[in-house]
Image: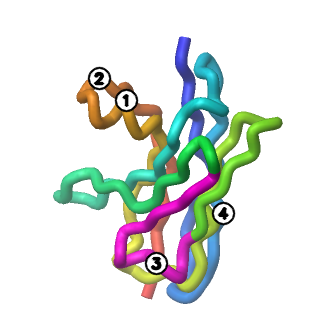
Amino acid sequence: QVQLVESGGGLVQAGGSLRLSCAASGIIFSLNDMGWYRQAPGKQRELVAQITSGGSTNYVDSVKGRFTISRDGARNTVYLQMNSLKPEDTAVYYCNRITRVLSGYASWGQGTQVTVSS
């Protein structure tokens, strides 16, 4: 059974930092491209950062230079370091397998709430 458990969210002031974690089980973690997604109230879920099985990364323009995605194969965990947070980063953050999301068959965990106050 696939499980993706996100943690690390919270309330932070603008300009602050948070580090999100996503612990994966039930998958061959090392073979999967992973992504961090977010969904703000009233908006569609968007992919904000992705990391391939080989460690290549890509980011949506709005977070470039502020967010860093990384992965630890020994812990089956993917991280999102978020710096210089802005109120518009407020959302529920989720992780998932990129290909699974693209297939339309992804299931989602509970996510972790990030709230940035101005």
Mark 1 or mark 3: whose residue is earlier in sequence: 3
On screen, 81 above or below 98?
A: below
Q: CA distance from mark 4 to mark 2?
A: 27 Å
Residue under label 4: 19
**Mark 4: amino acid:** Arg
Residue under label 1: 100
**Mark 3: amino acid:** Lys
Mark 4: secondary structure: strand
Mark 4 or mark 1: whose residue is earlier in sequence: 4
Task: Tell me the quarter of the image containing the N terminus.
Answer: top right
Mark 3: secondary structure: loop
Q: Quadrant of residue 72?
A: top right
On screen, 54 above or below 14?
A: above
Q: Which residues are magenta?
A: 55-67
Mark 4 or mark 3: whose residue is earlier in sequence: 4
Q: CA distance from mark 4 to mark 3?
A: 16 Å
Residue under label 3: 64
Residue under label 2: 105
Mark 2: secondary structure: loop
